[in-house]
Image (cartoon, rainbow, N blue to C red):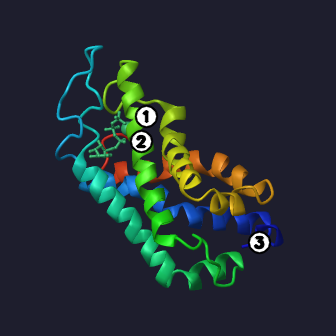
């Protein structure tokens, strides 16, 4: 994949496309979530919940599966779409170990979200309280970190290809995150618009 031969706008869409399993896994977690809290209601030594009722097994499993389903659909039926939008030509977006990368993106996003909840509880933020910077980048940060651990070459092959990929992640992530959450809120599947 050579991103430098594409325009900035094309790279923008390619990056969103690659990261789609990570961007959407939390949306699925909101839908399937709410059952079987991962911390089992346990309290940390500081007197607050370890993670809180917003992090559940049903959300983690449903969200990971949902994100992977999106990736699977992209992989098998998506090329006509992305090729049309971004001028790509049957690119191998997720590399040789595509299913593992897609899993790491979907699961990593939720792991990042969970890690953030752990730190939010440590700073006395209640479930659902706003923590703007953390909420916007936790999921994408952990998703990318897991792929880095697993296949550094794959990540490097596109994320450092010019300035556009990193720029897209930094700028588009907050907007997309907020946009998806506002939609979820309006549809009544999310309690807060963030
Ligand atoms: N959710 C879940 N399990 C997860 C992630 C999300 O069940 N691993 C569901 C929960 O019902 C949660 C909702 O999705 O309330 C929204 O997710 P999020 O905004 O991440 O959780 P919050 O309720 O805001 O909790 P926190 O303050 O810990 O982020
Ligand atoms: Mg939240």
Q: Is mark 3 within 8 Å of ligand 1?
A: no
- What residue does disc 2 label? 113
Q: Residue at x 35, y 24 (%)?
A: 121
Q: Are marks 1 and 2 in contact (CB under 8 Å)?
A: yes
Q: Nearer the viewer, residue 69 or 185?
A: 69
Q: Is mark 1 within 8 Å of ligand 1?
A: yes
Circle 1 crowding by C-alpha within 10 Å: few under 14, some 14–19, many from 20: some
Q: Is mark 2 within 8 Å of ligand 1?
A: yes
Which of discs 3 and 2 lies nearer the camera? The answer is: 3
* Residue 193 seen anywhere in this rendered image of the structure: no
Picture quadrant where residue 87 is located:
bottom right
| Mark pair 3, 2: CA separation | 31 Å
Q: Image quadrant of ligand 1?
A: top left
User: Which disc number belongs to residue 116?
Assistant: 1
Q: Earlier in the sequence, mark 3 or mark 2?
A: 3
Q: Residue 156, position in %: x, y?
A: 70, 58
Picture quadrant where residue 162 is located:
bottom right
Question: Is 174 situated left or right of 106 in this image?
Answer: right
Q: Nearer the viewer, residue 60 or 188?
A: 60
Q: Earlier in the sequence, mark 3 or mark 1?
A: 3
Q: Is residue 50 above or below residue 32?
A: above
């Amino acid at each position: 994949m050579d991103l430098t031969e594409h325009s900035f706008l094309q790279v923008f869409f390619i990056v969103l496309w690659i990261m789609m399993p990570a961007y959407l896994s939390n949306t699925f977690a909101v839908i399937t979530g709410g059952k079987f809290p991962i911390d089992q209601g346990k309290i940390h030594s500081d007197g607050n919940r370890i993670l809180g009722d917003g992090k559940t097994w049903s959300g983690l499993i449903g969200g990971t599966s949902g994100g992977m389903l999106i990736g699977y659909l992209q992989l098998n039926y998506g090329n006509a779409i992305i090729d049309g939008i971004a001028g790509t030509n049957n690119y191998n977006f997720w590399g040789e170990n595509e299913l593992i990368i897609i899993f790491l993106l979907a699961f990593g996003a939720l792991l990042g979200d969970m890690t953030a909840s752990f730190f939010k509880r440590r700073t006395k933020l209640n479930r659902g309280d706003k923590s703007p910077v953390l909420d916007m980048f936790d999921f994408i940060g952990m998703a990318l970190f897991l792929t880095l651990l697993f296949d550094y070459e794959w990540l490097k092959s596109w994320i450092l290809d010019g300035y556009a990929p990193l720029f897209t992640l930094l700028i588009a992530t907050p907007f997309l995150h907020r946009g998806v959450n506002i939609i979820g809120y309006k549809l009544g599947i999310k309690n807060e618009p963030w």
